[in-house]
Image: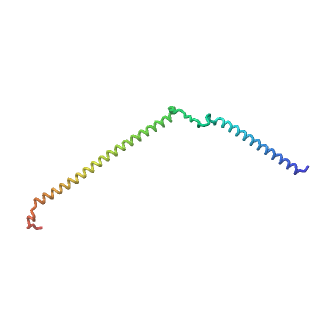
Amino acid sequence: MLPGVAIDTRKTIAREELNMSQVKKMLLGTAFIAIAGSAFAQTAQPSDAGQPPAQVTPAPQNLTAPAPTDPLVQKRNANAQANAEYKASKKASQQELKATSKQAKEQYKEQVRNAKINKKADKQTANDELKSAEPNGPQNTNLQH
């Protein structure tokens, strides 16, 4: 026997075994897919062919988390609640301060307007008094400077 011929036969035997294992895997895979597909097809068929399957909605549930027993979690929750209360209180006081400031500013502007009107009226009355008390010409012409 030739040494090169023995090696070639070993390679062909190995190739045949490799091909057989690939074929087995493919057959097993297709069989599994066929079984899974038929099982899915049996469950997915509606009972009435003309009507779509009815949708089942679960009943609403009120989900409430149980109170945590871990003290660190309780402290974290208490801190979060205290922070939320503080922020709400701070926001309310800021809005109150803004409203008070706005009202005070409007009141101040009104007082300034009234003061300007009064000043103008006082000036006008003073001018009128001077004009009425003063004769048409200068009174003392012999004034020396």
What is the x, y in percent for residue 89?
39, 40
Q: Nearer the viewer, residue 114 or 15?
A: 15
Query: Residue drawn 57% across and 35% down?
Result: 54
Q: Nearer the viewer, residue 124 or 55?
A: 55
In the rendered view, would you say 60 is above or below 93?
Answer: above
What is the x, y in percent for residue 79?
46, 38
User: Which picture quadrant has residue 85?
Assistant: top left
Name the side, left or right, on which 41 lies relative to 81. right
What is the x, y in percent for residue 114?
23, 51
Q: Nearer the viewer, residue 73 or 1?
A: 1
Q: Nearer the viewer, residue 46 or 108?
A: 46
In this view, the residue farthest toward the right is 1
What is the x, y in percent for residue 60?
51, 33
Here the colouring is: rainbow
In the rendered view, would you say 11 is above or below 49?
Answer: below
Query: Residue drawn 60% across and 37% down?
Result: 50
Name the side, left or right, on which 43 lies relative to 88. right
Q: Where does the C terminus fall, quadrant-wise?
A: bottom left
Query: Residue drawn 72% across and 41% down?
Result: 30
